[in-house]
Amino acid sequence: MFTTLKLAHLILTHGNPEHLQRLVNALAHPDAHFYIHVDQKTDIAPFLQLKNTPNVFFISNRIKVYWGGYSIVQATINSFEEILNASHTYDYINLLSGQDYPIKNVEYIHRFLADNPGKIFMHFQSITDEWHEALPRITRYHLSNYNLPLGTYRLERMMNRLLPVRSLPEGIVAVGRSQWFTATPDSIAYMVRYIHENPWISSFFKLTWAPDEIIFQTILYNSPYREHMVNDNLLYVDWSAGGASPKTLDMDDAEALSKSEKLFARKFNSNNQILSYLDTMMAGNAHS
């Protein structure tokens, strides 16, 4: 039987405030709150119109986010801390990007999570046994977090030639894949506390390429929460185009999106046609 579920959506964004407004509208629910982290490099003014939307809060401890660096991990941690310290309590915290959109209606999303209490929805693979291409991320030194003006690659090559191969502490199994996930507040509090109490992990991952895709899964996989992890982050993504970024979804993807069992999809731009299609689809399934 469906019970009331309190849901916090944490959205990390750096642009397109119009899409963000549409995303918030699509997920609006009496039992849903929204926490928005706007990249500190971005002018926040165009986003502040959302302050007039009920249950929307802006993360105050903003971070300048650089692709591939630890900065997005820090932005996520700061945001988690503000949610955990808020006066509201939640059953789930859902991490999204500002380029995502739901593909199931909001009642279905709340009902699905209420029917799966305590589960942690993350995409994770063993880096040594499955996600082999990610192995150099953790065995080699990367300086993407430091935003050096000149000589970054030369210094990386020198470090990787002269210094020992990097490795996690013995017994720690590295897993990861997608940075986006839906988790319980207690598991998120565990991750935040673990990072604060174990300085080695932030030191290690500050020299890792795209640590946001590894650090959180690795912490939980090597914890008592492992038994609650479901290897599915509830997010439809199309990597068929190849490259470092997924395909931008459009009307060519309408059928696949309509048949997907996922709750959300990424990534979208300002293509109103596919978004309007999804709105109509979700409205038609409002009572399913």
Image (cartoon, rainbow, N blue to C red):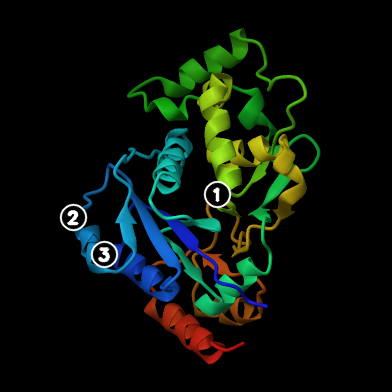
Residue 62, image quadrant:
top left
Question: Depth check: 87 or 239 in front?
Answer: 87
**Is residue 51 visible to us here?**
yes
Q: Secondary structure at mark 1?
A: helix
Q: Is residue 266 left or right of residue 120?
A: left
Residue behind mark 1: 185
Residue 18 in the image, given as x and y percentages of width and height:
29, 68
Instruction: Give the labeled residue for mark 2.
Output: 45
Disc 3 marks which amino acid? Answer: Leu
Q: Helix or strand or loop: what does disc 2 sit on?
A: helix
Work out which quarter of the rendered image holds the C terminus and state it.
bottom right
- Mark 1 vs mark 3: which is more N-terminal? 3
Q: Secondary structure at mark 3?
A: helix
Amino acid type for the residue under numbered disc 2: Ala
Q: Position of residue 251 (x, y in %)?
A: 50, 80
Between 61 and 1, the one lying in front of the other is 1
- Image point 72% across, 54% down: which residue? 231
Residue 50, numbered circle: 3
> Residue 103: x, y in percent?
54, 75
* Amino acid beneath label 1: Pro
- Mark 2: few, some, or many residues within 10 Å (few <14, many ≥20)? few
Question: Rounded to the nearest whole Å, what is the CA distance between mark 2 and mark 1?
Answer: 30 Å
Q: Is residue 250 above or below residue 8?
A: below
Which residue is drawn at the image coordinates 56% and 80% (left, top)?
254
Q: Is residue 235 above or below residue 107?
A: above
Seen from the viewer's position, the closer of residues 224 and 216 is 224
Count of residue discs: 3
